[in-house]
Image (cartoon, helix red, strand yellow):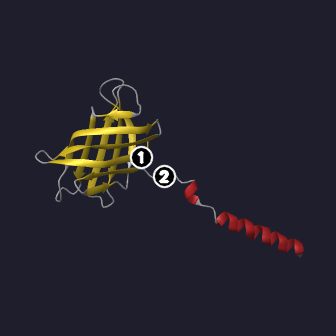
Amino acid sequence: MRMKLLMVAVIAASGIGLASCNKKDSAKPAGTFSLKVDSISYNSNATTASFTDTVVVGKKTLIVDGVTNNFSYHLQLMITFPDSIHTGSFDQQVNLSLMNVQQLKGTGFLSKYIKVNITSINSKYAEGTFSGQLTDGVIEKPLTDGTFKVDIN
């Protein structure tokens, strides 16, 4: 009888220990991609990133892609590396688009000038900040507080 009680106590203690494990510790962090145009913040809630080859042999482009949580805006940042993939500041071969998905509301913007500072990058992860000027073809607006932290597919 005591052996059964001891066994039940051990099983119960194990169950409590397992139930209290934090599953977030093993979960993969979600990618982040955000920016501010004038005083309006845009935050991607579905962010992906990948490398692609360009038409020019040997050039790689990092593409960070996202959509806002209300599916109103699509954000895309593309950085073509002049030689190898590495950290640093880039202002050539950098493009950003912020497009209204619904097209009936708001406007879309393309980069006029974007400067990206990549602080960490490898074949699986990239992190950095960016800022610059966007234009809708007529009006120019400042882009500030741009950040990305993404897993690369």
Nearest the viewer among 127 and 102 is 127
Q: Residue at x 34, y 34 (%)?
A: 89
Residue 79 image position (x, y, % from top left)? 32, 36
- Measuring 63% from the left and 62% from the top, which residue is drawn there? 21
Q: Are marks 1 and 2 in contact (CB under 8 Å)?
A: yes
Disc 1 target residue: 149
**Which type of secondary structure does the marked residue at label 1 adopt?**
strand
Q: Residues within 10 Å of mark 1 (few under 14, many from 20)?
A: many
Up/down of 33 relative to 13, above or below: above
Occupied quadrant, residue 151 = top left
In this picture, is 69 found above or below 138? below
Q: Residue at x 70, y 67 (%)?
A: 15
Could you tell me the amino acid type at mark 1?
Lys
The residue closer to the viewer here, 69 or 114, is 114
Q: Nearer the viewer, residue 86 or 150?
A: 86
Residue 152 located left or right of residue 111: right
Decide if residue 116 is on the left or right side of residue 142: right
Q: Position of residue 134 (x, y in %)?
A: 20, 45
Residue 23 in the image: x percent, y percent? 58, 59
At label 2, the amino acid type is Pro
SS for dot 2: loop
Q: Residue furthest left?
A: 138
Q: Indicate the quadrant containing the N terminus: top left, top right, bottom left or bottom right.
A: bottom right
Q: For mark 2, what is the residue?
A: 29
- Image quarter of the C terminus: top left
